[in-house]
Image (spheres, grey):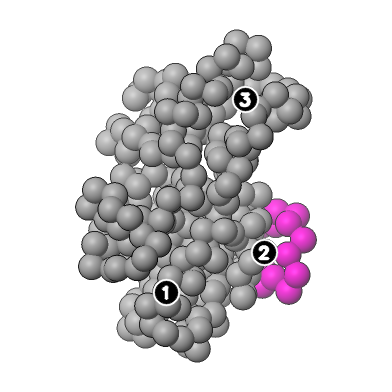
Amino acid sequence: MKYIIFTDLDGTLLDHDSYSFKEAKEALRLLQHKGIALVINTSKTKGEVLCLREELENSNAFIVENGAGVFFPKSVHHPRLEDFGDFHALVLGIKRQEILKITDPLQEKFGFTRFSDMSLVEVATVTGLSLEDARNAKQRDFTEPFILEDRTKLPQLETELPETIAITEGGRFFHFISKAQDKGKALLETQKIYEDLSQEKCISVALGDGKNDHSMLEVANKAVLIPKPDGSYENLDIKDAIHAPFPGPKGWNEVIKRLIE
């Protein structure tokens, strides 16, 4: 059976500090040589992923904003996909403007700051991104990252949200998302479409390092947990998970080579 590789970005394929994937290039070349699909599954936006896909020379499907949308090239046709600009897409989340409308009345009480509340320079500062990359991060379709200065308020904030909205925690930020979406559901839906198109079963491998990767790692056929920069692992309790030996792209590289060589 064919493999499909699903990967988180920050702290996983990309270095936590430099955002570089240099140390994973050997495994990336191996995937290309073997014709194995590499599907990005990230909290990042479509604009952010498009820039990275060019650098990776990747033309596969990609999942954005914590499972809110799956984008396929226009050349891919499937009954579940709809037109979405330059792509065909499977939409699993709700629109960002609806999330902003729902969370507006809660902002003063809980003191959170959303990306939409920040200037371009402020987003660049808190993320460490360039201004161009920060612009892509602000141009969202489905979800909203935010900073919550007082984490003790998180449980009460979650109880005051409507049933349609949830909060997930990424490497640097919290995110308001639709309860109908998560990285795991997006992985399963994407895997099914790939299997429909190829008419054969696939083995999914998921690589991640944080709490918001839990659902993706839990449903994958093979789960790979990448350690944090200090060498510790997120306590996700994933059965039979493979623990990468190094943080970031170096660990990613070692595990992928071990699995597919």
Rate crowding at label 2 as few (under 14), some (14 to 19) or many (20 or more) other CA atoms within 10 Å.
Answer: some
Q: Earlier in the sequence, mark 2 or mark 3?
A: 3
Q: Earlier in the sequence, mark 2 or mark 1?
A: 1
Identify the residue shown where x is 61% and y is 43%. Answer: 179
Q: Is residue 114 above or below residue 96?
A: above
Viewer-nearest of discs 2 and 3: 2
Q: Which residue is mark 1?
A: 194
For the residues labelled 2 and 1, say whether their Cβ atoms are less than 8 Å apart.
Answer: no
Rate crowding at label 3 as few (under 14), some (14 to 19) or many (20 or more) other CA atoms within 10 Å.
Answer: some
Give the left or right position of residue 157, taking residue 20 as reference: right
Instruction: Give residue 218's mark.
Output: 2
Q: Which residue is mark 3?
A: 148
Q: Is residue 139 visible?
A: yes
Which residue of the protein is positioned furthest toward the front in this rendering?
79
Query: Which amino acid type is marked by label 2?
Result: Glu
Residue 253 versus residue 98: which sits nearer the camera?
98
Identify the residue shown where x is 28% and y is 53%. Answer: 83
